[in-house]
Image (cartoon, coloured by chain):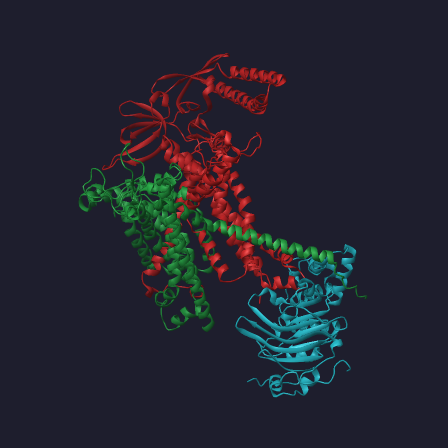
Amino acid sequence: MSRMAGRVGRSEGPWPWLAAGSVALSLLLLLALLTLLAVRGLGHFWPAPLALVTLEDGQRLAGRAVHEESVPGGEARERLYFTGNRDLAGDIWTWVPVAEIASRAFPEELVVLERRRWGAFLGRLVALEGEAGRREGQAAWPALQARLAELEALRGERDRLREAVVTPLVRRLERGPDAAAEAELARANARIRELQADMAGDTLVLESVDGRRLTQPLEEVLRALRPNAMSPVDKLATWGREVWRFLSEGPRAANSAGGVWPAIFGTVLMVLLMSVVVTPFGVLAGIYLNEVAHQGRFTHLVRIAVRNLAGVPSIVYGVFGLGVFVYGIGGTLDEWFFAESLPSPTFGTGGLLWASLTLALLTLPVVIVATEEGLARVPDHQREGALALGATRVEMLTRVVLPMTAPAMLTGMILAVARAAGEVAPLMLVGVAKLAPQVPVDGDFPYLHLDRKFMHLGYHIYDLAFHGGDVQAAMPLVYATALLLVLVILVLNLTAIFLRHHLRARHGALPRH
Amino acid sequence: MSVFSSPHALSDGPILDFERSTCCLEIEGLSLAYGEKPALRDLTLRVPRHRVTAFIGPSGCGKSTLLRALNRLHDLNEEVVREGSIRLEGQDIQAPEVDVAELRRRVGMVFQAPNPFPMSIYDNVAFGLRLQGGMRKRQRDDVIEWALRSAALWEEVKERLGASAWTLSGGQQQRLVIARTLAVQPEVLLLDEPASALDPISTLKIEELIRNLKSRLSLVLVTHNMQQAARVSDYTAFLQQGELVEYGPTQTLFTNPRLRRTENYITGRMT
Amino acid sequence: MIDPLPPRPDPGRQRWRHGRDRLATLLISAGGVGVVAAVLAIGVFLAVEVVPLFLESRHGIDWRGLWLPQSVEGHALPQHRWQPEPLAPGEPAHYGMAPLAWGTLKAACWALLFAVPLALGAAIHSALYMPRRLRARLKPTLELMEAMPGVVIGFVAGLVLAPYVERHLAGALALPVILPAGILLAGGLRTTLPARLRRRLAPGWAGIWLMPWLAALAALVLWGSPWLEEALFAGDLRGWLEATLGLDYAARNAMIVGIAMGFAVIPGIYALAEDALSGVPGSLGEGAQALGATRWQTLCRVVLPAASPGIFSAVMIGAGRAVGETMIVLMASGNTALMTLNPLEGLRSMSATIAIELPEAAAGGTHYRLLILAALALFAFTFLVNTLAELVRTRLRHRYRRLEGTA
C-alpha cells in the first residue's frame, strides 16, 4: 500500500494526524521506558555530590539529593535526601522542605563509607587509630585509603583460602578420618585466623555533620569515597568499578545492596539448560510436521494448535510444571531414589531442572514455528533436485534442506532464549529462590545441582521491589537490575532480527520462479 | 530406421510403436490423478534407447506429470492416484522391491528452472557420487571432470570449482545441473522444459548438449517450444488434456501430422 | 575422453542407506509426535486435575457456589468473596471465583481500551502513509517493545508510574484529551508554515517529528498538574472524585494496569493489524483513488472493510495476551479482589492469584484444585481466542489471494 504514500491532502481531515500521533505516542512510551531505566539504572553507580545542608533553624545534615516533589495541596516543595547513618539517626532518608534550606555547600572533606552493617555513613573522617598510631586531619584520609587497600587484599586471600583449601579439606574429612588432611586444615585455619587478626584492630573515628561522634571498626568498612573531591575522571573510574562490582558480586544486606552475580549466573544457567532441551526437540517436531507427517487435515490442526500454544499464558505452563514436573515426576523420583531424606524433598520441590524444563515447554512453540518457517522457505525444487539424484529422504534433509534452514533454527533458538530470560511468572511456581547462597554449580559431585533453587534476574526485580524492607533504598538496584535484564533481552532480540533479515536477503538471491 | 516397427493404432490416434528390445521405457495404460482431478488418461507409449523423445502439448496437458511419473517423483505427493505400469528396461518401477533412490539415480531429471544446491560447484557435482559412496577422491575428481566436460561446462568453471554454484549465470547453472545428473551415470535423462528460463544463447547451448548426449543415454524432453522439439528430438509425442494424441518421428509429425488436432496445435490454430 | 564406468551399486551400502533412512524417519516421527503430544498434554493435565473438584464430596464445591454470591458472616446480603485461607481458625474459607474473573476481564478491557486505538492508529499510519524505509525500521522497533519483560513493565508501572500518577492525577487524567488536541494542533500549525519547512515535516514522517512535540506537551501538562487541580477542583481532585462521582482511589488501580498492559499488547496488535492492512491488494485501493476518493476515504470505504477480519483477529490475540499476562497485573494492580466498575480501584486477576497462592496451596486440596481450575479457564480462553483468530486470518489470506487473482 505504500505505493499510495505521498502527501496528506488537506481535505482528509483530522484522522490521519491522529493515526500518525499514535505512532509517535507508542514510540514515545518505549523511549520513555528505556530512558528511565538507563538513566536511573546507570546513574545509581555515579558518585553523586554530597550536600551539606544547613536549615533555617540551624540544623545541619549531609546527604545526596534523591528527588523533589510538591507537597500535596500547596505550593511548597520538599526534597528527599539520602542521609545514611542508620546507626545514628535510625533512618536513612530525610525529607527537607525546600523553603527552609538556608544554605547548601559541597565541602570536599565529606566522606561516604560503605559498611557491612548499618549501611552507608555520610560525614567527616576525624581520625584513624591503629597499631601504627593515630592519624588525624589531613593525614587520616590517605592512611585510610592505604589501609583499605591492604584490607581488600587480606580479605581476598582469606576468601581464596576458604574456598580453595578449607572447603575441599572439610569435604575430605566428612568422608572419613584423615590425619594429613586434618593437619593441613589446622594450618589453613591458623592462617585464616592470622589474616583475621591482621584485619582487626583499626578503628575509625567519625563525626556526622551535626556533631555526633562514632567509632567504627575498620574491618566493617568496605569502601570509602570523597565524592566532592573527585575529578570527573576519578568519578568515571569509580563508576566503572561500581558497575563491575554490581555485575560480579553477590547481594548483601537482604538483597538491598551489593551485586547480582548469582542472579545473572542462575538466569544464564537456566536458559542454557533450557535451550539444550528445547532446540533439538523443537527442531525435531518442526521437521516432523513439515517434512515427514502426512500433510492432511489432522496435521493442519496440530500445526494451528502448536502455534496457538505460543499464546497460552506463561503462568499456565508454570501450573503444568508444578503439577507434573515437581509434584508428579519429582515426587516419584524422591520416593524411589531419595527416600532417606524424605519428608524433606529433593526433586519434589521447585529447582533448576524443573524450571528449565517448564521454560523449554513454554518456548517449544517458538522453536517449532521458526523451524517450520525456515523449512517452508526452502524451495521445493531444491528437495526435488536432491531426490532426483538418488538421495533418500533423510539424505535430502541432512545434506540440502537442513543446512539451508540452520539460520532460521538459530533465530528460533535465540527468540526462545529471549522469551525465557524475561519470563518470571512460571518460575515463581517451579523454582526460583529469593536468595540462593549456593550457585547450582560447584566443586561438589555431581558439580551441576539440578535440584537446587537458583536466583533469577527477573524474579530478583520482583522480590526487591515488592518484598524488600526498604523499597526506596532498593529502588536504584531494581533499576539497575531491570536495565541489565532489558539489555540482555534487547541484544538477543536484535541478534534474532538481524539474523532473520540476513536470511531474507540471502533467500532473495535464490533463483525464483 | 530399423528401430521401429510399422506404426499401428493403440488409441484413437496413430501411435508409433517400437520393438520391445529397443526401448528403455515402456508405459502401459498409465492413468494418474491428483485427488479428484485427472491428469493423465490411459497412456501407452514406448521410449526408444539413445534417442531424444519430446513431449509437446498445451499447458496443463499432463506432459510434466508424465515426466515426473517416470522417476516416481510423485511419491512425495500423497494425493496422487495412479493406475497402469511403467517399465524401465523391462522392470516395473512401481514394484515393491524397487529401490526408489536407485531408480532415481538411473532415471535422472533436470528441472525447468536451474536448481543448483547452495554449495560449491564441485560439491554440486559430487553430491550424487557421495551418496553412492565407495569412491576415492582421485577417482571422484576424474568423474567430476568428465561430467563437467560432458555438460560443456568444464572450460568455464575449471578455475573456480570451489566457488558457490549460485555465482554462475542461469545457463551455466542449468548445465551444472545436467553435469550433476550425468555424474551418477543415469540411463535415462528426463528434461522438464530445461531451457524455458534461459536466454536464446544459453538455450542453443543446452540444445546442442542434448543432441550430443544421446550417444550416451536416452533422453526425454518436455517442451512447450515446438521449434525446440523440432530442432533436437528424434520422436515427438503430442499430448492434449492428459491423452496421447499422436506419436511419431519428429519430421513426420511436424510436416505431415495425421490428425487435425495435432495440425491445429502445431500451426497455432488452438481452439 | 573415456566414459567412466557406471557406478555399480553396492548392495550392502544401499541396504545401510535405506536402513538409516527408515530409522531416522522413525526417530523424527517419534520425536515429533512425542513433542506435540507433550505440548498438547497441558490441557489434558489441567482437566484431569480439575475433575476431582466436582466429583469428590470432601471439596464441597459446586458450580453455582463458585460464581454466585455466598453468605458471609457480618454481611446481610450474600457477597462475592475470594478468601481461600480463613481469617481466623474455625471460620469458613470463601471460594468465589467471580471477583477473580471480574478482575481479569477488567484489567484486559482497560488494557485493550488503551492499546487498541494506539495500535490500530499506528498500523493505519504505517501501512498507508509511511515511506517504506521508515516502516522497515518501525516494525523491528515495535518488536523490541513486545520483547520487554513483563516484570520490568510491572515494576515501572507499580513503583514509578502509580505513585507519579497519584501525585499528578489531574494532569494524567487531562492527557487523553490534551494529547489528541495537541496532535491536531500540530497538523493545523503545519499548514501555516512556510513551504520549505513544511516539506521537511512530511506527513509520512509525522510519527517521528510529532514525538518531541508530544513529549513537551505531556511534560508541560504534568508539570502544571497542581495548578490544574487548584483551578478546577479546588486543589483536591481525589476528594472531588469521591464526593461527586463516588469513586475511591487506590494508587495501584485498573487504569495503571491498563496502561502498563496496554504497553505490552500494543506491538502484537500493531503487527497483525499492519499485516492485514498492507496485505489488502493494492489494486483495490487504487481503484477507489482513481475515482477521486482521498486516502482516508479509501481507507474507510475499501481497505478497512477488506481488512476487518484481520484487524479483528489482531484484537483477539491482544485480548488473549492481556487476559493471561501475570507479572504486570501482579505488580501494578494492588491484588485486591474487588468487584467494582471503578477504574481507579485495585483488582486481582486469576493469573496473579495463581502466581501468589499456588506455591502455598497443599497439592490435591480444594484450594489447589480451584487454582488449577483458574489455570484451565485461562488456558481454554486463550486457546479458543487464538484458534478463532488464526482461522479468521487463514480465511482472510485466501480471500486476498482470490482478490489479487481477479484484480
- In the picture, measured across the screen, residue A151 lies left or right of residue A472, that is right
> In the rendered image of this protein, which colour is used for chain C?
green
| Image: B244 above or below B96 | below
In depth, the one of C213 and B68 nearer the eye is: B68
| Image: B240 above or below C305 | below
Q: What chain is colored cyan?
A: B
Query: Residue A336 appears at what percent x and percent y?
Result: 52, 35
Instruction: Please give the count of numbered marks on the rendered protein.
Output: 0
In depth, the one of A148 and B136 nearer the eye is: B136
Whether residue C325 can be seen here: no
Question: If the image is split into quadrants, where does the N terminus of chain A sit?
Answer: bottom left
Query: Residue A33 appears at what percent x and percent y?
Result: 40, 44
Query: Residue A276 appears at what percent x and percent y?
Result: 55, 44
Whether residue B214 can be seen here: yes
| Image: A201 above or below B74 | above
In depth, the one of A388 and B72 nearer the eye is: B72
Q: What chain is colored red?
A: A
Residue at 35% across, 38% down: C159
Q: Residue furthest right?
A: C2
Query: Residue A406 appears at what percent x and percent y?
Result: 58, 52
To which quarter of the image does residue C253 belong? top left
Question: If the image is split into quadrants, where does the C terminus of chain A sit?
Answer: bottom right
